[in-house]
Image (spheres, grey):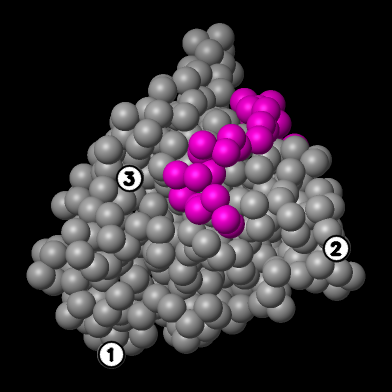
Amino acid sequence: MNDNESRSQSSVTQQVGVVVDPRYREHEGPVGHPERPERLRAVSEAIDARAAQLRRVAARPATDEEILRVHGRAHLEAIREASRLAPGNLDADTFVSVASERVARLAAGAAVELGLRIASGELRTGLAAVRPPGHHAETDRAMGFCLFNNAAIATRALQAEAGVDRVLLLDWDVHHGNGSQHCFEADASVLYASTHQFPFYPGTGDFGERGYGRGEGSTLNIPLPAGCGDEEYVGAMQRLLVPVAQQWRPEMLVVSCGFDAHRDDPLAAMKVSGAGFAAMTHIVRALADDLCGGRLLLVLEGGYALSGLIDATGATLDALLAEAAIPPRTPDPTTWDANGVLSHVIRRVHEAQSEFFSGLGAL
């Protein structure tokens, strides 16, 4: 590589930020709980392998003001008090330890900090590798391993502090982000889009959930049956998310980046490979390049197989670090299975959303 090539490659890769912090491992639950500190060791392994190409951003705690844009004061005080009395559980799935309130603030604050740096142009894109996850946390309720809704808090910070009026919040965690939908379903300034296994925990995210009031048409659910893999996930992104995003015209993309649709994951029944996550990342990166000046924030959600976390995190980072987004080719229409799972899902989404968006499912 000559000097010019080296400088060019550096200018690309150093625009990719990452937040990872050993303090996230201090949020500790019962023995055998799937949302365990080892998850971040696996993610860190993938990050460390690419450390020279990434710009580290320090984690910092979210302020009360940042949290209260999404959650009520009573919820904030409940998390603080539960941590003071820890160890304990907020529901059957969601634990707290003595460090949980502090660590949850660090998770939300990291998402905000990285998002604001991307919005300002200091960074092009980045991954906030945080825990606990956030997308199940509703405005007044912790659930599903989640205490504060990190991606929602970052989204509101972008609107309040960076002048980003319209945000597309894409959730590709294997579970539907009921909390994120709950936060934004009456808000026309945030388009919440989700691919998820259905029916499955938490039971929300059916086709007909489209938002309500002023936010009707700003919720896009793409429920997928168990057993879907790269073909269905990538196809749904190409044929549903892309035309919706192009018509909705967001000013920034935020991804609730769960890796529990990975084929190794023990909590779900999907079959996405590392290559599938890379392809999805290339798609959203290309959308961000086309619509948002490249501004793209990814916030870690689920992912409970250590092998899957290493594979999917590495594949996602490699797609972010590539010199340019290379979306996968759309399939040949003559080979498309009109009676297949993806075709059925596309038809159902079209039925639910056609009054708001055109061209859904087109090749």
SS label for mark 1: loop
* Of 268 and 30, the residue lying toward us: 30
27 to 31, vertically: above or below: above
Residue 60 forms part of the magenta stretch: yes
Q: Which mark is residue 330?
A: none
- Three-letter code for the amino acid on which mark 2 is drawn: Pro
Give the mark nearest the N terminus, 1 or 3. Answer: 3
According to the image, label 1 marks what residue? 339
Give the mark nearest the N terminus, 3 or 2. Answer: 2
Mark 2 crowd level (few <14, some 14–19, many ≥20, 10 Å Cα)? some
88 to 134, vertically: above or below: below
Q: Position of residue 80 (x, y in %)?
A: 71, 51
According to the image, label 2 marks what residue? 87
Residue 297 visible here: no
* Of 315 and 208, the residue lying toward us: 208
> Which residue is at a point 71% across and 78% down the rendered structure image?
92
Q: Position of residue 98 (x, y in %)?
A: 84, 52
Magenta-drawn segment: 48-75
> Which residue is at a point 52% across and 83% down the rendered structure image?
200
> Which residue is at a point 53% across and 72% down the rendered structure image?
175
> Which residue is at a point 81% across and 67% down the rendered structure image?
88
Q: Position of residue 297 (x, y in %)?
A: 47, 41
According to the image, label 3 marks what residue? 167
350 to 110, vertically: above or below: below
The answer to whether the residues at label 1 and label 3 have Cβ atoms under 8 Å apart is no
130 to 259, vertically: above or below: above
Mark 3 crowd level (few <14, some 14–19, many ≥20, 10 Å Cα)? many
Residue 331 occupies quadrant = bottom left
In this figure, what is the number of numbered marks?
A: 3
Give the mark nearest the N terminus, 2 or 1. Answer: 2
